[in-house]
């Protein structure tokens, strides 16, 4: 026993009572020897933790007086050999970290333990967490790491929304990307490509209405500031003065997540909705927050690598998508229509009098004409619609979840806008505007669709 009584700097610190009241987290200290472990004291936070568990201890005491009920519990993934305080020691001087299940029940603590060569130790308890939360975080982390192995950076968004939807038991998940040129949010991926009862319709209607109410002062999402990889959860039963209360009630959304995946001039957001009788629970929120840094990392990679590829696929005149990037998006949406049989419509916009414009004002007048058309089209469609420029110069607009009547409404709105357009006072724009609608999944391949809409 002599070696356990030798003076040591750690012992002197531990017996200095001045630190007991100023350390914020629970801390206790003691000595490990042949007969067992003796706890000599703890700070005020540790005392409050014991009082919460109806433990009234006088020091020094045996570890079993503090953690006895956990020793008899069955071992599992988080409590394997960890209910005993003795299991935390390595026998080597220095720091160790891990999770510990000291009090039984559902609660798991993260700890940092320092031990010296004489058996003295100090244990810092960093947090108290539900095992369900830790298990959920671990499960979701494994799923996300699996995605990184299975998919390329450019393919990651759809499976990412699917994994988050399924793991967190949400009705709908999506990723929005801010287009600074058009000053609007673009729906980059949603629900893993799955329809999911009426969840898509409610979410898309919500986003469509929300798109029209964007403030021109900076990039925001409602009253949420975008930046710093922040994440929020908003409930229907929010404060009465919340700007979200009315719109969530309108679309039957009980609560939702929002988080900044990518910040900067062109940020990206993750959204997750829960409707019906379901709310996003505290456990869901903690699981989401625990893996959020990893989700953000996937978003950063997508923007860095995927964005580099997309830059070369922008039309220099209108700023719209073009080439294979645009046609791939069209093909994906047409494939969804074939699988889930929702109505879908397309609009084709082109100039009939390019030669007259060029004679009057040169090639720049033609470019200005298409630039004006693109602007008016963008202001006439929803956030979920897809617009791009084809190789013949015409603009193609794809309207998911839109039947023939809905397409005629959009087409009529565009015709009214086009009447007053002209880059030159002497020449009016003559515009071709064709529409094509499909329902019940009866839709041909992409090449035939393009041939039909072009006439």
Image (cartoon, rainbow, N blue to C red):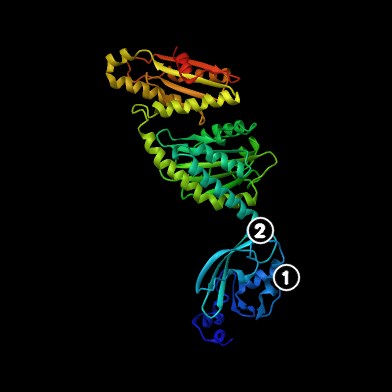
Quadrant of the image containing the C terminus: top left
In x, y percent, where is residue 274?
63, 41
Q: Quadrant of residue 373?
A: top left
In x, y percent, where is residue 205?
58, 31
Q: On residue 263, which mark appears?
A: none
Disc 1 crowd rating (10 Å Cα; few below 14, some 14-19, many 20+) is few
Q: At x 49% / y 40%, what residue is drawn?
A: 150
In x, y percent, where is residue 343?
58, 22
Q: How many numbered discs sit on the rendered protein?
A: 2
Q: 18 left or right of 69?
A: left
> Which of pointers 2 and 1 indicates the residue nearer the eye?
2
Q: At x 55% / y 39%, what residue is drawn?
A: 161
Residue nearer the viewer, 73 or 262: 73
Q: Is residue 169 visible?
A: yes
Disc 2 crowd rating (10 Å Cα; few below 14, some 14-19, many 20+) is few
Q: Is residue 243 visible?
A: no
Residue 434's place in the image compared with 177, above or below, is above
Mark 1 secondary-structure assignment: loop
Mark 2 secondary-structure assignment: loop
Residue nearer the viewer, 107 or 4: 4
Q: On residue 76, which mark appears?
A: 2
Find the distance from the CA under tag 2 to the CA under tag 1.
Answer: 25 Å
Q: Which residue is mark 1?
A: 54
């Amino acid at each position: 026993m002599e070696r356990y009584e030798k003076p040591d700097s750690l012992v002197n610190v531990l017996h200095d009572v001045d630190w007991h009241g100023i350390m914020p987290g629970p801390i206790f200290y003691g000595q490990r020897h042949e007969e067992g472990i003796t706890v000599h004291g703890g700070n005020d936070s540790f005392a409050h933790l014991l009082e919460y568990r109806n433990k009234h201890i006088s020091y020094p005491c045996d570890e079993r007086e503090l953690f006895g009920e956990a020793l008899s519990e069955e071992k599992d993934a988080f409590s394997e050999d960890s209910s005993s305080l003795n299991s935390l020691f390595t026998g080597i001087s220095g720091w160790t970290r891990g999770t510990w299940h000291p009090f039984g029940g559902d609660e798991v603590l993260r700890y940092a333990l320092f031990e010296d060569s004489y058996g003295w130790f100090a244990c810092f308890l960093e947090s108290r967490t539900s095992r369900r939360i830790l298990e959920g975080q671990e499960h979701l982390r494994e799923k996300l790491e699996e995605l990184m192995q299975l998919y390329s950076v450019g393919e990651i968004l759809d499976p990412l929304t699917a994994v988050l939807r399924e793991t967190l038991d949400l009705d709908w998940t999506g990723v929005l990307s801010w287009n600074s040129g058009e000053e609007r949010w673009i729906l980059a991926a949603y629900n893993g490509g799955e329809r999911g009862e009426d969840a898509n319709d409610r979410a898309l209607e919500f986003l469509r209405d929300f798109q029209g109410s964007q403030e021109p002062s900076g990039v925001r999402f409602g009253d949420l500031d975008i930046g710093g990889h922040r994440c929020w959860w908003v409930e229907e039963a929010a404060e009465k003065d919340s700007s979200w209360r009315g719109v969530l009630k309108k679309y039957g959304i009980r609560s939702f997540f929002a988080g900044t995946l990518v910040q900067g001039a062109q940020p990206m957001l993750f959204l997750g909705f829960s409707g019906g009788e379901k709310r996003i629970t505290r456990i869901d929120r903690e699981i989401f927050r625990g893996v959020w840094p990893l989700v953000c990392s996937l978003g950063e990679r997508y923007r860095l690598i995927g964005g580099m590829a997309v830059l070369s696929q922008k039309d220099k005149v209108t700023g719209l998508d073009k080439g294979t990037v645009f046609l791939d998006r069209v093909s994906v949406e047409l494939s969804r229509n074939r699988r889930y049989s929702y109505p879908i419509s397309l609009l084709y916009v082109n100039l009939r009098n390019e030669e007259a414009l060029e004679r009057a004002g040169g090639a720049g007048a033609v470019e200005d004409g298409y630039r004006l058309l693109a602007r008016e089209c963008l202001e006439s469609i929803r956030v979920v619609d897809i617009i791009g420029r084809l190789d013949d110069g015409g603009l193609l607009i794809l309207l998911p979840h839109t039947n023939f009547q809905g397409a005629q409404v959009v087409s009529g709105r565009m015709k009214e806008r086009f009447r007053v357009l002209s880059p030159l006072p002497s020449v009016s724009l003559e515009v071709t505007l064709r529409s094509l609608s499909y329902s019940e999944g009866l839709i041909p391949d992409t090449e035939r669709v393009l041939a039909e809409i072009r006439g």
